[in-house]
Image (tube, rainbow, N blue to C red):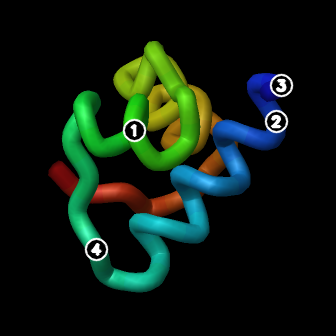
């Protein structure tokens, strides 16, 4: 899956009000680098809280 696809799936997940752990991201989306995806989304201007 591409970085853009991972970003979209992670963004949709957190915008729905759910939290996510690295293990959940790996299991649900096949995303090994959740921290990098969150960082990129924040840099793109999406308000994501810890």
Q: CA distance from mark 4 to mark 3?
A: 22 Å
Q: Is residue 18 above or below residue 19?
A: below
Q: CA distance from mark 3 to mark 1?
A: 16 Å
Q: Is residue 28 left or right of residue 45?
A: left
Label drawn at residue 19: none
Tag 3 near tag 1, CB within 8 Å:
no
Q: Which residue is mark 4?
A: 18
Q: Is residue 25 left or right of residue 23?
A: right
Label 2 SS: helix
| Residue sitting at x 59%, y 29% | 40
Label 3 SS: loop
Answer few, some or many: residues within 10 Å of disc 2's Cα (few below 14, many 20 plus, some between 14 and 19). few
Q: CA distance from mark 2 to mark 3?
A: 5 Å
Q: Nearer the viewer, mark 3 or mark 1?
A: 1
Q: CA distance from mark 2 to mark 1?
A: 18 Å
* Residue found at the far front of this picture: 27
Q: Which residue is mark 1?
A: 27
Answer few, some or many: residues within 10 Å of disc 4's Cα (few below 14, many 20 plus, some between 14 and 19). few
Which quadrant does the N terminus fall into?
top right
């Amino acid at each position: 899956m591409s970085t853009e696809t991972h970003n979209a799936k992670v963004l949709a997940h957190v915008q729905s009000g759910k939290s996510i752990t690295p293990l959940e991201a790996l299991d649900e989306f096949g995303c090994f680098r959740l921290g990098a995806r969150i960082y990129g989304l924040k840099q793109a201007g999406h308000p994501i809280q810890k």
